[in-house]
Image (cartoon, rainbow, N blue to C red):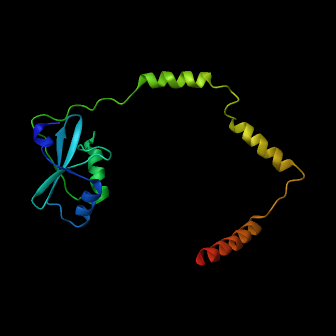
Amino acid sequence: MSDSVAAFPVLQHATLQQLAAAKALNQVRAVPMDGGWGLLARYGEAEALLQAQRARRPRLFRRLETLVDYLREIGVPRVEIEVGAAPPSPAATRRRPDRAQALRELHRARPATAAPSLTDDVAEALAQAENPATEWISHKDLKREWLVLRAALASREAFS
């Protein structure tokens, strides 16, 4: 993160959303940061960076399109993009080739009986359906029973 961006206080998502709803944002800028884009909001005389959810550091958007979608979602109609001297460096890849190998080994180690297949489930359901002792109920009767049960639950909740 550049030194000029690090000097700003941080702003939480809920606060930014409230400011946007109140139309109290004077300016919203996408600023280049290491690995992506930060969101700098000016409201009144204050300026702050959008905070990451679980850390007291600026939220980083790896793609500019994601940042724009986020702003649309919270109701910010306009954003300025600060390109700066250099565009943000490409985001570090999140791929973990070691995880692919670990999952393959886990799958090989799991016995075949650990997870029944869909065909086993279907075969069991068909066997139950063909059993002469199976009781069948019409959809109409089922809907009627649920209406009675729902009414009983609603009346019980009314007295709680």
At which x and y percent is residue 122?
74, 42
From the viewer's perspective, tell me whether residue 116 is left or right of residue 27.
Answer: right
Residue at 26% across, 63% down: 18
Number of numbered discs: 0
Q: Does residue 112 appear left or right of residue 86 in this picture?
A: right
Farthest residue to the right: give it: 132
Query: Which quadrant would residue 41 be assigned to in this image?
Result: bottom left
Vertical comparison of 71 with 66: above or below: below
The residue closer to the viewer here, 31 or 13, is 13
Q: Residue at x 32, y 47 (%)?
A: 53
Quadrant of the drawing holding the C terminus:
bottom right
User: Could you say where residue 90 lies in the image, as x and y percent from the top left?
Assistant: 24, 31
- Which residue extends farthest front? 160
* Quadrant assignment, res 158: bottom right
The structure residue drawn at horizontal position 16% and vertical position 35%, both measured from the top left corner, is 87
- The image position of residue 132, as x and y in percent, is 90, 52
- Residue 84 coordinates in the image, percent (x, y): 10, 39
The answer to which of 104 and 86 lies nearer the viewer is 104
In which quadrant of the rendered image does the N terminus lie?
top left
Q: What residue is drawn where x is 60% and y is 74%? A: 157
Vertical relation: 24 (above or below) 38:
below
As displayed, is residue 143 above or below residue 51? below
Relative horizontal placement of residue 110, taking residue 24 as reference (left or right): right
